[in-house]
Amino acid sequence: MPLPDRGTAWPPKGHEDQFAAMARWDAWYVGTPDGLNRAYTSTTRTRPAQHSGGVVGAVARWFWGKPAINGRRPAQLHVPLAADLAQASSDLLYADPPTVTSDDETTAAALQDIIDDTAIQVLAEGAEIGAALGGRYHRVTWDRELSPRPFISTVHYDAALPEFRFGRLVAATFWTVVHRDNQLVVRHLERHELAGGDGIVLHGLYQGSATDLGRPVPLTDHASTAHLATQVGADGALLEGRTPGLSVVHVPNMTPNRAWRTDPVGQYLGRSDFDGVEGLMDALDETYTSWMRDVRLAKARLIVPQAYLKTQGPGRGSHFDLDDEIVTPLDIPLPEDGQSQITPQQFDIRVEEHQKTAQDLVEQILRSAGYSAATFGEDEEGAAATATETMARKGRSLLTRGRKIRLERPALQDLFTKMLLTDQSVFNRSGIDPGSVTVDFGDTVHDSPLQLAQTVEALERAKAVSVETKVRMVHPDWADDEVTRETDRVMAEHSMGPVSDPADPALFG
């Protein structure tokens, strides 16, 4: 189908709940108090009970989104645990980059050219944003002025409209706001779809408003799209790069999607790490805000008579400096009862109560989001732990990582296969086999070199392991030829020749 018609509501009707949820998750991820208040006041109708005090007001609102009273909001503190969750999700997947290989040597060399540190960084950043919003899209991009090879770019969930068939992505429309001036909004639309099994990409520029796509205008009307004008046909489709399959892959963060399981599109979207724990994160922020309020209230104060205040001049009031560490004697008569008229005041700080509440909330949030406390540095032990012990402590996080890998791996294999096809079609790379790509995420928990050496030593004493196996244990990431060379070197240094087969007839003449 072509690009949208002029005058289309944007985003199209029917996706309001999904984009509202993504806006809230984005506010938690960014973590500014203003952003959180906007997210929870703009998506929730203000009720009279929200302005009430006591129990009625407390149950009618969340901590974030509380209406301002007399134009002022109380001090609010945010704990950036949501951002920590998203970063931990990305680190579990890409702190140790996946290994992308091919049995074909020419294809393996091509993969090394297109999957560099920049590509891994793009994937890691996408995984972090995807953990917050529920998923992301990676697309194969090419621009001869920027790179002699195709490269990866990312589109976030809140800037995409996907179309699925039996849970498989068959089309997607992305948009970018390239200009905004009061009521005028200019958007660049990029649509990916299939035509006869080949992926095609259409580009269009629209001039409209905040809620209306408006009318299509030439791509040359904006600097960000002008370079596309000579690369598309009359229908807006790119003239080159048509190869089997879409040029974009959908990578959901977690499945199934509990909130939108009956929605025709939402049921195929990924689930945010924040889904279901927003209330707990809200309570955590309220707990820390209350704790800091205790700290402020516990600041030593003196209650003094009006006569003790220092005047600041006619019509400018008076004050008593609470932070003045120098006590200045005041020439005033003592009261008849001999008691001081200055009353000290200092409230208690409820440290233990707040700390236990906050700790319990953090544990609930991590457990509900699918992570172990050890992933975030909690419950660390003093002595160095073995890989087995570390896996036991981080078991919940590793289970979550495994579920995410099952969604990442097939998407990356499709993505890298499409990159190879594009490299053939657009950049004339020859001799490669795009269908032979393998992606391996490996393990995130490894024994230290000392622990590996102790294990190998114990097996050596038991005469239960060969030299080659020992080399593979110490260097699990090495290729077969590297292992063979190292095995030969070890045997040569220790004057160990190959062992002959006792059944070899040549030994008996």
Image: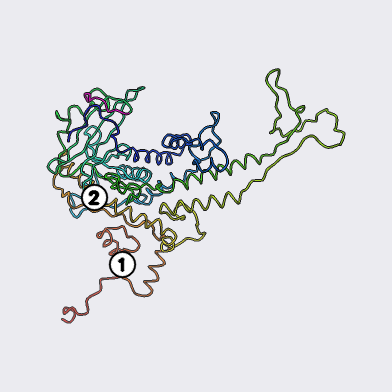
Q: Residue furthest bottom?
A: 508
Residue found at x 56% / y 43%: 55
Q: Position of residue 110 (x, y in %)?
A: 21, 46
Q: Position of residue 225 (x, y in %)?
A: 25, 28
Report the residue marked by disc 1.
Answer: 469
Q: Is residue 212 magenta?
A: yes
Q: How many marks?
A: 2
| Residue 216 found in image quarter | top left
Tag 1–tag 2 contact (CB < 8 Å): no
Q: Position of residue 509 (x, y in %)?
A: 15, 81
Q: Magenta residues, as a range? A: 211-219
Q: Is residue 331 above or below residue 493?
A: above
Q: Taking 312 as reference, is 179 left or right? A: left
Q: Is residue 164 magenta?
A: no
Badge 2 amino acid: Gln
Badge 1 amino acid: Thr
Q: Is residue 332 above or below residue 388?
A: above
Q: Earlier in the sequence, mark 1 or mark 2?
A: 2
Circle 1 Cα neighbour tier, 10 Å, few/some/many (<14 / 14–19 / ≥20): some
Q: Position of residue 346 (x, y in %)?
A: 70, 41
Q: Secondary structure at mark 1?
A: helix
Which mark lies nearer to you, 1 or 2? 2
Q: Secondary structure at mark 2?
A: helix
Q: Taking 231 as reference, is 52 left or right? A: right
User: What numbered label is drawn on residue 413?
Assistant: 2
User: What separation in Å lies between label 1 and label 2 (alpha carbons)?
Assistant: 30 Å
Relative depth, front residue between 19 and 493: 19
